[in-house]
Image (cartoon, grey):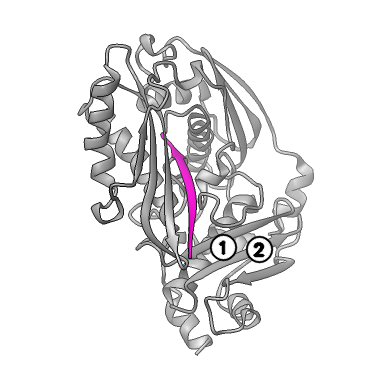
């Protein structure tokens, strides 16, 4: 039985990702100077403009325009011919303090808001992530590497990828389609660009055994991608939540991550849910696992814990859920401590997905609870 699943990713120069990076750069700057700072920071970018707004409570001062310009330069918006550059764009800020009503619940160890968060893991890849989103992320990371290392001097910062995987009886068998959108200078010929991207990006990333003569490959399918970045598309923080998580493979509670300090369970509980699900799959308790945690503002313990193994486990999901409550810390304060979330690590998470990043030092990717789970569920 065949079916197909598709996921996408975007480069750090995509307008929405620019905004995620700005929001998380502000958060990192606060945490570097004040670990007790509270941040809920949003950004918007359009032609020649970046606007940063939100609620920040901290004892330190952040020079946001300087931070934004430095980040845009690092991304690669450093040439006026792109139509958007770090020196000439306007930067507007509108920052106020976080509501004291929220602090009433958070300061006592409760959740910073109500909400539901999902974590997912499966055994399709060594990272225990779905194959379509992992390939999509790797393609755009490689596209950025090729640009920044000047392997292709005509590339500009914006870009997208999309991968469709064919499944047979629930297991990935081949890549059915690959799509790349590569932002470029006017000087390059389309056929030359397509040849270069095929060789240096697609062939470099997609395993040969997953591609055959029927795999469809589209590179800049309209023919040109000269106008990109904030010139062509308004960017907003938190608009790539499916790219940030599992590529649509699992459920999503709707809350974005970027710009939120870990007292916000949208972020911290999503990381804990992934940590739990990954350890369950790593312990071979299930081939697939989705964990949902839900919270009430001002209340420390989750109001519900749900486990779905999609029929891939012989152990009752109720027993797995009970083991989760016994093994994993689930209050916001405990999650922050367990996953070491008061570090300035968040700018690194903002592009190329928050999960499946085993070399980045993200605690939620560790599989150190495998023995505990096996012992509890033996």
* Image-based side of 214 in relation to 365, left or right: left
Q: Which mark is residue 273?
A: 1
* Image-based side of 66 in relation to 42, left or right: left
x, y percent for residue 138? 34, 45
Q: Is residue 211 at least partly visible in the picture?
A: yes
Q: Secondary structure at mark 1?
A: helix
Q: What residue is rendered at 71% in x and 58% in y?
A: 110
The residue at the far right in this view is 101
Q: Judge the density around disc 1: few (<14), some (14-19), many (≥20) Cα neighbours within 10 Å.
A: many
- Spatial separation of the CA atoms under disc 1 and disc 2: 7 Å
Q: Which residue is mark 2?
A: 293
Foreground pick, 215 / 64: 215
Tell me which label, 1 or 2, sits earlier in the chain. 1
Q: What residue is rendered at 42% in x and 23% in y?
A: 222
Foreground pick, 238 / 51: 238
Foreground pick, 25 / 15: 15
* Quadrant of the image occupied by residue 336: bottom right
x, y percent for residue 223? 38, 21
* Image-based side of 356 in relation to 211, left or right: right
Q: Main secondary structure of the magenta part?
A: strand
x, y percent for residue 357? 39, 53
Q: Which mark is residue 252?
A: none
Q: What is the magenta range? A: 1-11
* Quadrant of the image occupied by residue 204: top left
Q: Is residue 10 one of those drawn in magenta?
A: yes
User: Badges 1 and 2: C-beta atoms under 8 Å apart?
Assistant: yes
Q: What residue is rendered at 49% in x and 64% in y?
A: 121
């Amino acid at each position: 039985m065949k079916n197909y699943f598709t996921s996408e990713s975007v480069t750090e120069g995509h307008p929405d990702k620019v905004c995620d990076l700005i929001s998380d750069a502000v958060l990192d700057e606060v945490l570097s100077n004040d670990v007790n700072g509270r941040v809920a920071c949003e950004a918007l970018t359009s032609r020649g403009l970046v606007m940063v707004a939100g609620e920040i409570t901290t004892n330190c001062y952040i020079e946001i325009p300087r931070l934004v310009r430095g980040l845009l330069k690092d991304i690669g918006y450093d040439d006026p011919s792109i139509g958007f550059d770090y020196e000439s764009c306007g930067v507007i800020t509108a920052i106020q303090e976080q509501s004291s009503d929220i602090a009433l619940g958070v300061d006592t160890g409760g959740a910073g808001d109500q909400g539901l968060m999902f974590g997912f893991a499966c055994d399709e890849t060594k990272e225990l992530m779905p194959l379509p989103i992992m390939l999509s992320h790797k393609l755009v990371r490689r596209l950025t590497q090729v640009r920044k290392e000047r392997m292709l001097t005509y590339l500009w910062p914006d870009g997208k990828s999309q991968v469709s995987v064919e499944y047979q009886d629930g297991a990935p068998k081949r890549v059915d389609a690959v799509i790349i959108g590569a932002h470029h200078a006017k000087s390059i010929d389309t056929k030359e660009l397509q040849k270069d991207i095929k060789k240096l990006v697609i062939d470099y990333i997609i395993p040969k055994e997953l591609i055959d003569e029927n795999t469809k490959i589209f590179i800049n399918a309209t023919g040109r991608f000269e106008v990109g970045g904030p010139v062509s598309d308004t960017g907003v923080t938190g608009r790539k939540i499916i790219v940030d998580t599992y590529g649509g493979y699992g459920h999503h509670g709707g809350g974005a991550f970027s710009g939120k300090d870990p007292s916000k369970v949208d972020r911290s509980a999503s990381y804990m849910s992934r940590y739990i699900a990954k350890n369950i799959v790593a312990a071979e308790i299930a081939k697939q696992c989705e964990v949902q945690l839900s919270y009430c503002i001002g209340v420390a313990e989750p109001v519900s814990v749900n486990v779905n193994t999609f029929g891939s486990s012989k152990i009752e999901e109720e027993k797995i859920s009970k083991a989760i409550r016994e093994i994993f810390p689930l209050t916001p304060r405990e999650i922050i401590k367990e996953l070491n979330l008061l570090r300035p690590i968040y700018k690194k998470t903002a592009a190329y997905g928050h999960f499946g990043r085993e070399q980045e030092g993200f605690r939620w990717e560790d599989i150190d609870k495998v023995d505990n789970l096996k012992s509890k569920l033996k």
